[in-house]
Amino acid sequence: MMKRRIVAGVAAFGIAIALAGCSAGGRGATGSGDGGGDNKGALVGVAMPTKVSERWIKDGDAVKSDLEKAGYKVDLEYGDNKVQQQAQQVSNMITKGAKVLIIASIDGGALSDQLDQAAKAGIKVISYDRLLTGNKNVDYYVSFDNYKVGVDQATSLLTGLGVVDADGKKTGKKGPFNIEVFAGSLDDNNAGFFFNGAMDTLKPYLEDGTLKIGSGQDQLSQAATQQWDPATAKARMQNLVASTYSGGTKLDGVLSPYDGMSIGIISALQGAGYGSGDRPLPIVTGQDAEAASVKSIIAGQQYSTIYKDTRKLAKQSVTMAEDLLTGKTPETNDDKSYDNKVKVVPTYLFQPTVVTKDNYKEVLVDSGYYTEADLK
Ligand code: BGC
């Protein structure tokens, strides 16, 4: 009896999968799992990587509130930068019956089992900011132009050093300037895009001798920072100061890909005497316009950051989810740049904005991203 019930259950499950498989087959009018109005008030699973960095808290809050405003139920989870924890959270969302998953991964290649399960159950997957890799069951990607972020970071380093002017034109200033370069986490697909965008931009200046990477550590593998960890970046900066800049050689610039790391790098430099007496802090870049870094920029420590309006990203991911749940085809604007090693994932990209002391008010305060008080 018991056995027969299990068999029947398995058979029913098989049919459900087959049905879901059918209806999920094509995009457009019938493109969304259950299709049409059945998905009203459906559950959407939202997986975010960590609360250590302020930006992901803003992302999570914005996605949740936009989904709720649109009438959906939300399961928002943070993975605490633990790959297994995030995998478990995504599995739970599938079990709970989520119809769409919006995932900002910790390790982009570590959720393959979950993506396979999701596809079997007819659940659509939107890769949020960080591309999910190594699996075909990634339906859409929404992010900022990550290569351009790297270009902008490097350009602001050049501007800060006075090598190019505000319009991006060469000033003729020849240095030579000593710089060091940092990169993000290798399990995050974005890290390579940022680094390549930046290094392609710096290349001509490295080749003509305007810039010199003092340590010689110019490879992504040497510059990478596991999980974008500020303490790891700080330790590497301390080591670089000890190995390369202790004998009076001046460090003029540091390419940092993320604000949290920039804070760690600046703290290492201050510990080594930079930022006081006749040793100014080098030009240090960043990303995310996190409040602590914007304050540091206002105080004249960090030079620049890259603003990526998380409200826009959140809104777009929610529009995509709604389209998928109501049988529409989500809008994309880049269907060639993001190959996840198995397929090119249709993408919607936003453009980043460089922020320095000169424009932070206009870009961050006037747009309502921060109030003046947030930055005090
Ligand atoms: C994001 C960046 C962020 C970094 C560290 C990247 O995937 O695109 O905005 O600085 O992760 O959290």
Image (tube, helix red, strand yellow):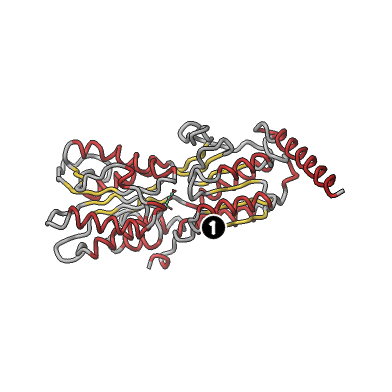
Q: Position of residue 29 (x, y in %)?
A: 69, 33
Query: Dot 1: what SS?
Result: strand
Quadrant occupied by the C terminus: bottom left
Residue 6 falls left or right of residue 370: right
* Residue 323 appears in the rendering: no
339 left or right of 214?
Answer: right
Residue drawn at point x = 34 percent, y = 43 percent? 195
Most distant residue in the left direction: 248
Q: Amino acid at mark 1?
A: Tyr
User: How many labels sit on residues?
Assistant: 1
Few, some or many C-alpha atoms within 10 Å of disc 1 (few <14, some 14-19, many ≥20)?
many
213, above or below 294, in the image = above
Q: Is residue 314 visible?
A: yes
Viewer-closest of 173 and 345: 345
Spot occupied by residue 144 in the image (x, y as percentages of width and height): 45, 44
Left or right: residue 157 versus residue 346 is left
Q: Quadrant of residue 296?
A: bottom left
Q: Is residue 252 above or below residue 20?
A: below
For the residue pair 1 and 293, the one nearer the viewer reads as 1
Give the residue pinned by disc 1: 78
Mark 1: C-beta under 8 Å from nearest atom of ligand 1: no
Q: Position of residue 304 (x, y in %)?
A: 32, 53
Residue positioned 74% across, 44% down in the render = 37
Looking at the rendering, which quadrant does residue 127 occupy?
top right
